[in-house]
Image (cartoon, rainbow, N blue to C red):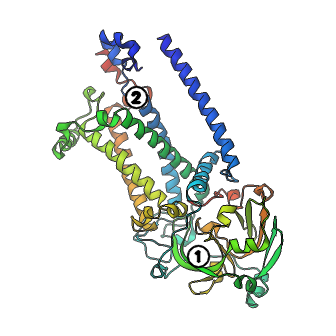
Amino acid sequence: MYVHADPCYASAMATASPRAISTTPRHAAVVRITHWLTVLAFLALLVTGAEILISHPRFYWGESGNPNMHPLFSLPLPTSRPWVNNGFGTAMPDGNGWGRYLHFEAAWVVALTGLVYVLWGFWRGHFKNKLMPERDERSVGALWRVVTKYLRGGRAGDDEAHSYNALQRATYLVVIFVLFPVVIWTGLAMSPSFTSALPATASLLGGRQSARTLHFVVTLLLVGFFTVHVTMIALAGFWKRTRAMMTGRAAAAKEDA
Amino acid sequence: MSGLSRRKLITGGLAATAGVAGLAVADRLAKAYGLVPPDAGGIFGPGETLTYAAQSLLTAHRPAREFPRSMISKDPFAVPIAPPSDAFKKSQALGFSDWRLTVDGMVARPTAFSLADLKAMPIQSQITEVACEEGWSYVAEWIGTPLSGVLREVGVLPQARYVAYFSVEPDQWDSLDMGEALHPQTYLTMGMNDGELPVAFGGPLRMRVPMQLGYKNLKFIHHITLTDSMKKFGKGLGSVEPEFGYAWFAGI
């Protein structure tokens, strides 16, 4: 795969045939492995997060909040605990035991996978070369041009099978460097043990309940990203794009061209 | 191409060997330094062990967050308790004057403490938050005597590694490692917000562990025993909670 990066094969590059170029992976092995580990862990976190949520689907701001206090907002869901009946029943099964076990195990996977990916990304210039928007793309106008293209029904063509457009780049950077760090931070800010070592993780957010509410809001943003991401892949050709992320090879049409 | 795949095979093989060896070393070290929780088995074991080991190494000696008096919750919440037994009601009618906390197991001097005995020990208070695994929380002032003082009184034997504690409620028991048991904020609590500890909140005697979530803070404590292994208790998972699927370590 990494033919071009191997000095022993430099001579092969000198006489690069179209075939040799097409074997350059669309996505590096590290990207592919960390991507799918994150997908698995994210889905586990989402399901278990929902499971934990139905034991108390009420949100507060500040340090404290409990069934005796007025919530900031409350979700119209059936619950697994009788003392937080929001009017939709309390018959849900209690899944907080396995839910919390799996939530934290998956959180370790996301955190460690993310650490490997980010360190590798800086080391190999992945963010600089693949994800930083090009100089002429660093404007709201450039992002807007992509949005309007999509809105007019434009699909990502084969020209986009080998690189990301301005909107993709900006979105991926926000997901990697804002949403995931914040969702991990707000999660840790709910841990009495972690906040004993670093009290600022909770106090900077305004308290434990603020952290919990933000954890939920950032989760909604991540679910929003996930939904749009999968939709766009489906529009661009689900198997073509998914295969590129699994095998590393870009669209077959490109190779044949 | 065959050279490349042979090289990949060798590199991959070496990486896998290093990985397995690394895991084996980590496993040895974790066991030697007490970084493996009693409920480390099963598919959630690796995550649970990472969490507990991280806590033991990074946060175990730090104090839980304390709050100013102005932040004490006006509306604290307690999960409704089961109807008290006749024995409990009789004790309550006597103002809990017959309540006894027996401390035994790996100790030099097994002792039964009355509430008056415990109140004669150094009394301290902390304003800390009770956080339930469901998500809700409240801040209260907790008044009691540090568990470490009681353990000093009975003389803990050096081989003891866990402090198991039992509620008068059936099937309510839990345990702490020695680090958490000797933590200065771990109290045998008898008062709350300048008054007696209400029965709804665990009176007359509640284990207060502010480093961990609400469910480690058992109500109605009447028995403590020191042990070198939690394998001897229940299903050997450290507390009754893992028998219902909940983690033994509840610091997160």
Q: Is residue B38 left or right of residue B137?
A: right
Q: Which residue is mark 1?
A: B78
Badge 2: chain ID: A
Q: Amino acid at mark 1?
A: Ala
Whole-percent x, y for residue A26 in the image: 36, 26
Determine if marks 2 and 1 fall on one subunit: no
Q: Whole-percent x and y of residue B218? A: 67, 71
Instruction: Tell me if mark 2 has few (under 14), some (14-19) or many (20+) residues whose alpha carbon lies within 10 angstroms of its own.
Output: some
Viewer can see residue A207: yes
Q: Which tag is nearer the camera, tag 2 or tag 1?
A: 2
| Residue A12 vertical placement versus B231 (above, below) | above
**Number of numbered discs present?**
2
Q: Residue at x 37, y 18 (%)?
A: A23
Mark 1 lies on a secondary structure that is loop
Pick whichever, B3 or A190, lies toward us.
B3
Up-down relation of residue B188 to residue A12 (above or below): below
Q: Is residue B153 above or below residue B51?
A: below
| Gap between marks 2 and 1 measured at Cα | 52 Å
Q: Residues within 10 Å of mark 1 (few under 14, many from 20)?
A: some
Asked whether, in this view, residue A109 is left or right of residue B119, the answer is left
Label 2, on which residue? A28
- Residue type at mark 2 is Ala
Is there any visible trace of residue A16 in the rendered image?
Answer: no
> Where on the picture, by quarter, is residue A20?
top left
Q: Which of the image's four quarters has the C terminus of chain A?
A: top left
* Place of residue A136 in the rendered image (x, y in percent of width and height, measured from the top left): 17, 37
